[in-house]
DNA sequence: TCATTTTATAGAACTATTCTAAATTGGGAT
DNA sequence: ATCCCAATTTAGAATAGTTCTATAAAATGA
């Protein structure tokens, strides 16, 4: 049942060029929240000549078509998130690594702000990853 | 009893040069979460010749001494937050304006992640500001 | 095949921030 | 008051992530 990257692109209305597929193979299937640069490195393992411009064009295209989300943690560190449905994040202060948390692992309640129409709630937990524990059972 | 900017700087161990005071006068007393560029504009109203380098040097200095916090919402939009104690944020999708929310206006509970040592919980609400309501009674 | 459109590419341009190296400042000490 | 000197400020160069531009290559399909 698992769709190929080509299928995913077609379903999103994106014609699956070899470059796009090479990028998709990595970026749509990683939980690592990579930067554009990390995507470049991975994509070049499959398609050594792929250009930087194509990486950016393609990542932007994927975001526009809802296959990726993007967020900025600090200046000059934009990352891409392959998980597009709502979820939360834990960020390791030491390594900077971002972990997905299932949406229902965090509950948020808030006052009724009559001034605000809330569309989305995003929680970021920061701290340290406990070293003695196994790598973590992570989000969907 | 309200401390002058000069006092605040001295207490933080920063010698209050005229440039630093000019910047502090604005950035330590605004709730608007300004960018470096907005700080430059405001500081130049008091000290027209102040340089860009000084804006960045000083903002970084204030952050290092705990007078400001910084965060990035999107690539190339780093803002400074004069409120350094824990609180949450509402971001207006349309205008990009950031509003502080009192820490106790949002309650978060989460599973025990034995893999993570959580040090900080940050909530960002996104949506639209309700136009018919008054400008909002905002955070401390 | 050929014409047309789409996609990819190199490299220039852009922009926020940091760096560098030189000038200016201002508070003691004399 | 003057001198000294460390601290501070400054202009402009450098850097880095991203976007733009103009050209080339590839795919499409009649
Ligand atoms: Mn998948
Ligand atoms: Mn104040
Ligand atoms: Zn995620
Ligand atoms: Zn704030």
Image: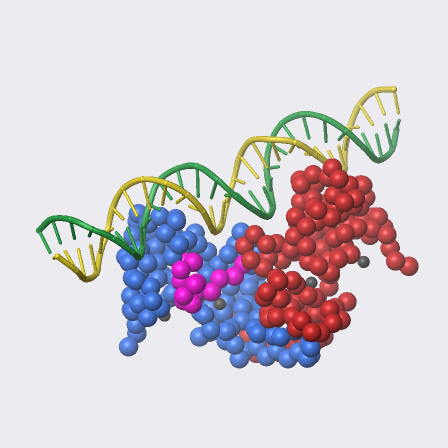
Chain colours: A red, B blue, C yellow, D green
Which quadrant of the structure image shows residue A137? bottom right
- Give residue D1's position: percent from left, percent from top: 8, 51
- Give residue A106's position: percent from left, percent from top: 67, 75
Q: Residue furthest right?
A: A1
Relative depth, front residue between A66 and B86? B86
Q: Is residue A71 magenta?
A: no
Q: Is residue A77 visible?
A: yes
- Range covered by the magenta-colored residues: B59-72
- Give residue D28's position: percent from left, percent from top: 85, 35
Left or right position of A126 against B53 = right
Left or right position of B63 against A59 = left
Left or right position of B76 against C30 = right
Relative depth, front residue between D22 and B9? B9
Q: Which image quarter holds the N terminus of chain B?
A: bottom left
Q: Which residue is drawn at 74% across and 46% down?
A: A43
Which quadrant of the structure image shows residue A81? bottom right
Q: Which image quarter holds the C terminus of chain B?
A: bottom left
Which quadrant of the structure image shows residue C10? top right
- Marks counted in the figure total 0
Q: Residue at x 30, y 72 (%)?
A: B3
- Give residue B126's position: percent from left, percent from top: 59, 65
Q: Does the magenta stretch include residue B68?
A: yes
């Amino acid at each position: 049942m698992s769709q190929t990257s080509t299928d995913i692109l077609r379903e999103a209305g994106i014609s699956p060029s070899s470059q796009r597929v090479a990028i998709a193979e990595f970026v749509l299937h990683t939980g690592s929240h990579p930067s554009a640069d990390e995507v470049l490195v991975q994509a070049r393992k499959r398609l050594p000549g792929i250009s930087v411009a194509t990486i950016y064009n393609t990542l932007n295209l994927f975001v526009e078509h809802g296959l990726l989300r993007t967020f900025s943690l600090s200046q000059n560190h934009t990352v891409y998130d392959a998980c597009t449905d709502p979820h939360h994040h834990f960020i390791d202060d030491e390594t900077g690594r971002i972990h997905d948390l299932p949406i229902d692992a965090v509950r948020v309640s808030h006052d009724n702000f009559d001034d605000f129409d809330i569309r989305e709630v995003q929680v970021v937990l920061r701290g340290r990853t406990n070293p003695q524990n196994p790598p973590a059972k992570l989000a969907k």
